[in-house]
Structure formats: structure tokens, C-alpha cells
């Protein structure tokens, strides 16, 4: 009889190696696209940023926006080239209120 002690479980080793490769590729894809890695702030954080933005804008008597920047824009319109135009690019998913920041909405925030 031939002893199976020295036999290597090649199919199991290959399956584990392939699993590690697939997980690494999925992890890299998620990291490079910003998925699950703090691409978008929570709404509480964004509301806090909005309060700070509105306070700065109010101190300037609503004449000039803080840093000359709009608060945010829709996520699809923010690029690497134009992200400096916005104060809180990470709040882009809250377009219901993040895009419509006006002096009136800032006054109603309090």
C-alpha cells in the first residue's frame, strides 16, 4: 500500500491561492473607487460642516462664500480638476439639501 501522508492537497492549495487573489482584487477595486473607505461622510458630519460654512458666510454678510467655494455639488459632477470649487465634496450624496445652500437656508439652520 502507498502511504498518502506525503501527498500534498494541491486542489485545496490552489483554491486558497485563487481566493486570496480574488479578495485582493476586489479590495483594491473598492479602495480605488472609494467604496466603503470614507468617500462619503455621514449626514451628521455634513450637517456640522454646513453649520460651520453658514457661520462663516454669515460673518461675511453673505457677500462672499467661504473660500469662494460653493458648499457642494452632485457627486457625478465633482472631479479632481474642479474639487477645489467646493467646500464639502464628501457631502455630495446629500443633494436634497447640500446643493441648495442659500443665505435663507443658512438662516433657517439655527
Image (cartoon, rainbow, N blue to C red):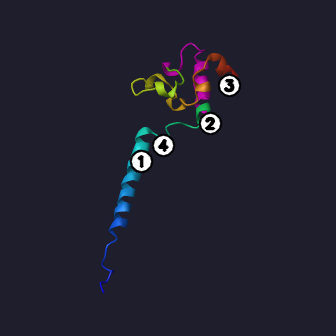
Dot 3: few (<14), some (14–19), or many (≥20) neighbours within 10 Å?
few
In-image side of 98 versus 36 (left or right):
right
Check disc 1 and report the residue beneath it.
26
Is disc 1 in contact with disc 4, using a CB cutoff of under 8 Å? Answer: no
> Residue, x 48% and y 27% (percent of image)?
76
Q: In the drawing, what numbered circle is on residue 109?
A: 3
Residues at marks 4 and 2, CA–CA distance in whole angstroms: 17 Å
Q: Nearer the viewer, mark 1 or mark 4?
A: 1
Residues at marks 1 and 3, CA–CA distance in whole angstroms: 41 Å
Name which quarter of the figure residue 1 lies in: bottom left
Residues at marks 1 and 4, CA–CA distance in whole angstroms: 13 Å
Decide whether the magenta segment is chiefly helix, strand or loop. Answer: helix
Span shown in magenta:
48-68
Dot 2: few (<14), some (14–19), or many (≥20) neighbours within 10 Å?
few
- Helix, strand or loop at label 4? It is loop
> Residue, x 45% and y 39% (percent of image)?
34
Residues at marks 2 and 1, CA–CA distance in whole angstroms: 29 Å
Q: Of 32 and 5, which appears nearest the observer?
A: 5
Q: Position of residue 88 (x, y in %)?
A: 52, 29
> Residue, x 31% and y 76% (percent of image)?
7
Q: Position of residue 92 (x, y in %)?
A: 53, 29
Dot 1: few (<14), some (14–19), or many (≥20) neighbours within 10 Å?
few
| Badge 3 or badge 2: first in the primary sequence | 2
Is disc 1 in contact with disc 3, using a CB cutoff of under 8 Å? Answer: no
Check disc 2 and report the residue beneath it.
44
Check disc 4 and report the residue beneath it.
37
| Badge 1 or badge 4: first in the primary sequence | 1
Residues at marks 4 and 3, CA–CA distance in whole angstroms: 29 Å
Up the image or down, 62 lies above or below 9; here it is above
Q: Of 24 and 59, which appears nearest the observer?
A: 24
- Helix, strand or loop at label 2? It is helix
Amino acid at each position: 500500500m502507498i502511504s498518502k501522508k506525503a501527498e500534498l492537497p494541491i486542489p485545496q492549495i490552489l483554491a486558497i491561492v485563487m481566493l486570496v487573489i480574488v479578495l485582493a482584487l476586489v479590495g483594491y477595486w473598492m479602495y480605488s473607487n472609494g467604496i466603503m473607505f470614507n468617500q462619503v461622510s455621514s449626514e451628521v458630519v455634513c450637517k456640522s460642516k454646513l453649520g460651520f460654512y453658514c457661520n462663516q458666510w454669515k460673518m461675511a454678510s453673505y457677500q462672499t462664500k467661504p473660500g469662494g467655494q460653493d458648499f457642494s455639488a452632485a457627486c457625478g459632477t465633482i472631479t479632481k480638476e474642479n474639487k477645489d470649487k467646493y467646500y464639502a465634496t464628501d457631502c455630495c450624496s446629500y443633494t436634497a439639501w447640500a446643493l441648495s445652500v442659500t443665505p435663507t437656508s443658512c438662516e433657517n439652520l439655527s
